[in-house]
Amino acid sequence: MKRKIFATVLLVSCFMVCLAAIADLSGKWAGKLVMGDGTEYPLLYNFKIDGDKLTGTALTPEGDTPITAGKTDGTTFSFNVTTSGMDIPHTGKFYGDSTAIDLQINGAKIHSVLKRPEEKK
């Protein structure tokens, strides 16, 4: 009997940790994309989480663009952003204080790390 109660408590605790991780991914994340030739582009995402669905916006050279086909399981996520006529798939992993993200651009995988931007006081 004690074993069942312990297993149930452990399972519920793991579930709550996953839900907390999903909630923490919401909000603004910033970083930079460094291309092979050294050119840098700023990255800014505003994620919104609803269950396992990820929505929001990404800052592109064309302005804020909606995130499409977004999904998450709490620690990993994926979505697409369309800019300059290209559909750019993104995959990532949430670490709490940072997020690692990979973009597929013209067949090349480009890695970046995102952090929450500093709030101006």
Image (tube, grey):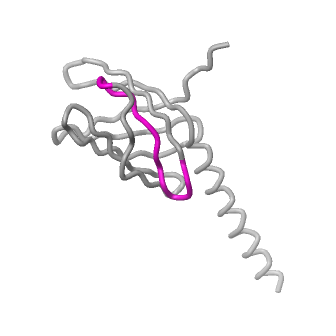
In the displayed structure image, the side of residue 63 where residue 93 appears, left or right: right
Whether 28 is drawn above or below 107: the answer is above
Occupied quadrant, residue 35: top left
User: Is residue 59 or residue 19 the one in the foreground?
Assistant: 59
Residue at 76% x, 82% y is 4
Occupied quadrant, residue 62: top left
Q: Position of residue 106 (x, y in %)?
A: 16, 38
Q: Is residue 51 magenta?
A: yes
In the displayed structure image, the side of residue 2 where residue 79 appears, left or right: left
Q: Position of residue 95 (x, y in %)?
A: 54, 42
- Which quadrant of the figure contains the N terminus? bottom right
Residue situated furthest left in the rendering: 106
Magenta segment's dominant SS is: strand
User: Is residue 4 or residue 45 the one in the foreground?
Assistant: 45
Q: Position of residue 93 (x, y in %)?
A: 46, 46
Residue situated furthest bottom in the rendering: 1
Residue at 46% x, 41% y is 56
Q: Position of residue 30 (x, y in %)?
A: 47, 27
Whether 19 is drawn above or below 6: the answer is above
Q: Is residue 7 magenta?
A: no
Occupied quadrant, residue 41: top left
Residue at 41% x, 51% y is 70
Q: Which residues are magenta?
A: 49-62
In the displayed structure image, the side of residue 98 where residue 20 appears, left or right: right
